[in-house]
Image: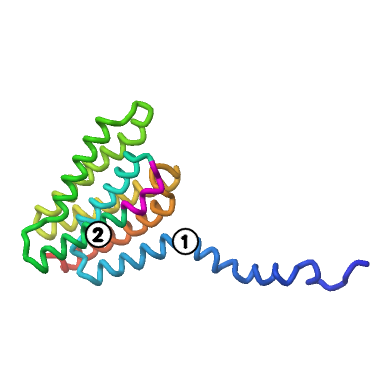
C-alpha cells in the first residue's frame, strides 16, 4: 500500500544528514579556514615575516617535487614554520644577526641545484618547474629583505600574489603537492599579498 505521507520517502537519517549539508561543505574547505586564521595571526603579530613566508611556500613545492611525494607537503610546511620561528627566536632572544629569509633562500637554491642535478629524466617535468620557481620566488624574497620598507612591501606583496597563482594552477591540476596544501597556500598567499600592499598604500610600511 502506498503511503500518502509526503515525507515518507525521506528516512529520518536522511533528513538529519540533509541538515548537516552546509556544515559539511564548510568543513570541506578547512584548508581555507586554517589559512585565513593563520593570515590573521601573522598580521596581528606585526606581519614582518612576509619574505620568509614567500620563501617557505616555494621551498614546500620544491621539497615535495624532489622527494616525489605529494603527501610530504604538509610536513615540509611545518618545517618551514619551525625555521621561521627559530629565526625570530634567535634574533629576539639572543640578538643574533640572522636573516632567516636569506638562509631559507640559500637552502632553496641548494635544493634546486640538487634536484635538477639528481632528478631522473622522467621526473624532470615535475622537479624542473618547482626548481625554477624556487629560484624566482627566492630572488623576490631576497630583494624584499634588502630593499627599503615601501619597495620591499610592494615587491613581496606582488610575489605572494604570484605564488597564489602558482598555488591555483597546482590545485586545479592536483599535482606536486597535496591538493589541501595548494588550497591552503593559495588562500594564505592571497590574503597576505593583498594585506601587505594595502599596508604600503596606507603608509603603515614606511
Residue 70 lies in the magenta stretch: yes
Q: Which circle marks residue 83 in the picture?
A: none
Q: Is residue 86 above or below residue 64?
A: below
Q: Is residue 73 left or right of residue 30?
A: left
For mark 1, give the secondary structure.
loop
Q: Which residue is drawn at 31% across and 57% down?
A: 78
Residue at label 2? Answer: 82
Q: Main secondary structure of the magenta part?
A: helix
Q: Which residue is drawn at 31% across and 31% down?
A: 119
N-terminal of the pair, mark 1 or mark 2, is 1
Q: Is residue 25 above or below residue 115?
A: below
Q: Can you say which quadrant of the picture contains the C terminus? A: bottom left
Q: Residue at x 6, y 59 (%)?
A: 97
Residue at label 1? Answer: 29
Name of the residue lying farthest toward the right:
1
Residue 118 lies in the magenta stretch: no
Amino acid at each position: 500500500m502506498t503511503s500518502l505521507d509526503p515525507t515518507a520517502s525521506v528516512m529520518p537519517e536522511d533528513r538529519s544528514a540533509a541538515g548537516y549539508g552546509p556544515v559539511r561543505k564548510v568543513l570541506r574547505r578547512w584548508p581555507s579556514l586554517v589559512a585565513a586564521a593563520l593570515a590573521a595571526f601573522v598580521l596581528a603579530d606585526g606581519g614582518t615575516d612576509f619574505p620568509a613566508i614567500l620563501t617557505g611556500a616555494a621551498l614546500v613545492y620544491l621539497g615535495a617535487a624532489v622527494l616525489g611525494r605529494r603527501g610530504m607537503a604538509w610536513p615540509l610546511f611545518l618545517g618551514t614554520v619551525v625555521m621561521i620561528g627559530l629565526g625570530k627566536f634567535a634574533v629576539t632572544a639572543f640578538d643574533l644577526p640572522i636573516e632567516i629569509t636569506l638562509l631559507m633562500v640559500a637552502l632553496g637554491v641548494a635544493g634546486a641545484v640538487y634536484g635538477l642535478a639528481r632528478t631522473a629524466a622522467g621526473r624532470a617535468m615535475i622537479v624542473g618547474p618547482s626548481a625554477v620557481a624556487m629560484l624566482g620566488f627566492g630572488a623576490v624574497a631576497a630583494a624584499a629583505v634588502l630593499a627599503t620598507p615601501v619597495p620591499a612591501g610592494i615587491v613581496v606583496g606582488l610575489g605572494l600574489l604570484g605564488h597564489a597563482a602558482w598555488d591555483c594552477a597546482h590545485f586545479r591540476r592536483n599535482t606536486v603537492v597535496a591538493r589541501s596544501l595548494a588550497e591552503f597556500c593559495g588562500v594564505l598567499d592571497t590574503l597576505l599579498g593583498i594585506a601587505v600592499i594595502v599596508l604600503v598604500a596606507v603608509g603603515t610600511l614606511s
